Image (spheres, rainbow, N blue to C red):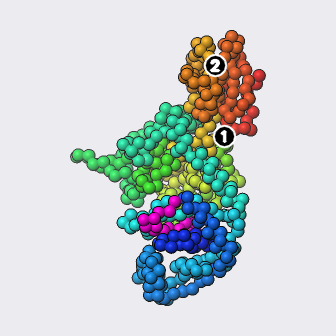
Amino acid sequence: MTPLYRLRHSLSHILAQAVLTIRPDAKMGFGPPVDNGFYYDFDFGDNPISESDFKQLEETMQRIIKEKQQFEHLDKPVDVAVAELAAAGQKYKAEYAQYLADNGYAPNGTLSFYRNGPFLDMCEGPHLGATNEVPKATFKLDKLAGAYWRGSEKNPMLTRIYGLAFPTPAELKDYIEKRELARQRDHRKLGKELDLFEFDEEVGSGLPLWLPKGTVIREELEKWAKETEFKAGYQRVSTPAITREQLYYTSGHLPYYKESMFPPMELEDEDRYYLRPMNCPHHHKVFATRMRSYRDLPLRLAEYGNTYRYEKRGSLSGLMRVRAMCMNDAHIYCSPADVKQELKSVIEMYKDYYSHLRLGDFRVRLSLHAKDNDKFVDQEAEWLRSEEIVREVLNEMNIGFEEEAGEAAFYGPKIDIQLKNVMGKEETVSTCQLDFVMADRFGLEFNNAEGGTTAPYIIHRAPLSTHERMVSFLIEIYGGAFPTWLSPNQVQLIPVNETVIDYTKGIEEKLRANLIRAEVDLSSDSFNKKVRNAVTSKNPNIWVIGSREAEEQTITWRRYASKDQVTLPLSTAIETLIKMRDSRLMDNFADVALPVTA
């Protein structure tokens, strides 16, 4: 085990000893190290603990650390261990010790314990050598949570005390600061504050309602993708969100993907129908509408298609994990000779999108099959050939990547794009898959130049992921402050007094005539509060209009999060704004030189 694991594991024991020092009647559950720290579960009976007790607990932990208690390993016979734990009033530990013995986890008839000072706990270790090896100022008790004993809701609810622990004080401080930033930027929090989306239990868990402002962001991303794909030779299709179940038997998604699909719809005198969890089988059917020629290829079919997946309620997480999603989907049908170039073009598209959106560095993972795993189609030669194609493409493009076995799609290898969130945690934002299976299953082929027929390779790609996942990333990375082209409200117009309202409304009409989203603040709030409201709402552009501006046909322009402002002729300001929009300028980034000059 790593030194960090030993540190966190040792701290969980020190925490338990501190709890029993101030609450001797507490009953212990489990106390493992976890990501970012450690926890320990307790039953406090009728005398619950609160976070106000953390100061006393931390002081007691510090005293234990200073006592230089040695961590000593010892083994106890099962019957002795169970009896001693029961006699000490530790009923949960006694129960679990008996469970381990009854299920073959004590093959030598003994169970492992660790002692430090007067504290003894059933544990496999490892730990530090002594409590004083815990570096100063590297841990902090964090929060309380409820946890069922052994994870079953049939069992008693225990109190879980979480602690943070890192190798150095600087790392602990950095984590706490990043977590606070992540809390402030949490897309669920900002989505509600900025009126972007909502969830309603009467509609259903994991089914987002996109509000008008959130829908603007979706539509701007979709518009950008459609323009990009048109230039790259994609053709758009539209396909239904439900289908007969036979389609998924043909594709192989049934029965293997059934757990992630909504239950079928039973129709009288008809086959069963499913909500689609993906668009690809429909696109394969579009390809199959007529016999294709090699001259038709590559055929690139694109669709922002709505899909539905049954995610368990406990795994739902804002827009990051939902049950209804709209995917930036496309499928490229190409000859074996063209597959490498098509993959390269797709990867270049990914790079262009991520670079423009300022999503930061991303990691590429080549997800491969696992030979002995029933999840994957049993065509070993094709697996090796297709994986080598993707590997060669990445190497030829000088893209660093890591390989991971067992993470491929069941029909071919994947390129997974791994992006770090505000906390530095890695998430899969989108994938690109090379499919060597579905052409055969759907009987897809094209007339080749030699007069015969050939099955196409199929590339599945979704560079902008789903609207739901991509927007959640963007909200958190930008902190809700979107660049002008993506912002729901592109200009907030603030009249200084009532005498300039007509001029201000006239500006709003001119902006809307140029398809620029603008709003006038006609509230009774003071001027300063109107400005504060505009800033709080994260409007990228605030135009202030006073008597002088009305007289000279100008506006005074203030950017989001900037105290600087500039007065411009109205015509110049509108022209500048149009350029910012049309170029999709990322003007919310400080290193971008704004085209706003006096």
Residue 562 shown left or right of residue 190 in the figure: right
| Farthest residue, direction right | 598
| Residue beneath disc 1 | 356
For the residue labelled by badge 2, is the local secondary structure a helix, a strand or a loop? loop
Quadrant of the frame with the C terminus: top right
For the residue labelled by badge 1, is the local secondary structure a helix, a strand or a loop? helix
Q: Are marks 1 and 2 in contact (CB under 8 Å)?
A: no
Amino acid tagged 1: His
| Residue beneath disc 2 | 496
The percent coordinates of residue 297 (x first, y second) are: 54, 43
Query: Dot 1, how many residues are within 10 Å of its Cα: few (below 14), some (14-19), or many (20+)?
Result: few
Identify the mark at residue 148; answer none if there is no mark.
none
Position of residue 408 relative to residue 509, above or below, is below
Q: Nearer the viewer, residue 593 or 525?
A: 525
Q: In the picture, residue 257 is in which quadrant?
A: bottom left
Q: Which stretch appears magenta?
A: 32-50
**Residue at horizontal 66 percent and vertical 40 percent from the top:** 356
Q: In the picture, residue 253 is in which quadrant?
A: bottom left
Position of residue 229 relative to residue 178, above or below, is above
- For marks 1 and 2, give the CA distance: 36 Å
Q: Name the mark nearer the viewer: 1 or 2.
A: 2
Residue 90 shown left or right of residue 117 in the figure: left
